[in-house]
Amino acid sequence: MVREYIKAERGVERMRDERNDCTVRALACAKGISYDEAHACMNAYGRESRRGVKNATLTVAYESAGFKMAAIFGTTKKARFLKHCHPDVPNFKGTTLKKLLPILGKGRYIVGIRGHVFAVVDGVVMDYGYLPTGLYVTNIYKLG
């Protein structure tokens, strides 16, 4: 079986000596702001430089930037936690990136997978490198 990949468009450039910053890059791309603005926003809600972010912190920071949790997928630990925090958000059967992208279409989204987030702007994936199409999506934030 051949593994399929989606080539992501390069979004924003990261700061020098920064890593584990997919949450910052996704916010910058999806919102259309600079990396520095997104970095300041995430830091204001508790993100430490060169460190990843917990889901609770991530949700608060994205909601302050104008994103709303649009959907939760699957039954993973992350999905169960998000469902507990957002009982009003619809919870769907698990789906892959390949099945989800045609549905998203026009709009600005931040898509969560296990251990990573990336932006989708008007159907174009904004991240670094290639993403396997078989990745299972855990949640989606939508701008507006």
Image: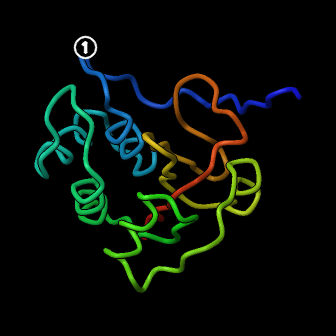
Figure quadrant of the N terminus: top right
Residue drawn 16% across and 29% down? 49
136 displayed left or right of 103: left
Residue 19 in the image: above or below residue 104: above
Q: Quadrant of residue 143?
A: bottom left
Q: Quadrant of residue 2?
A: top right
Pick out the residue farthest to the top: 17
- Residue 141 in percent (x, y) is at 45, 62
Residue drawn 51% across and 68% down? 72
Q: Which residue is mark 1?
A: 16
51 displayed left or right of 28: left
Colour style of the rendered protein structure? rainbow
Residue drawn 51% across and 52% down? 111
The residue lying toward the viewer, choosing from 128 and 35, is 128
- Residue 45 in percent (x, y) is at 13, 52
38 displayed left or right of 47: right
Disc 1 crowd rating (10 Å Cα; few below 14, some 14-19, many 20+) is: few
Q: Quadrant of residue 93?
A: bottom right
- Residue 104 in percent (x, y) is at 67, 61
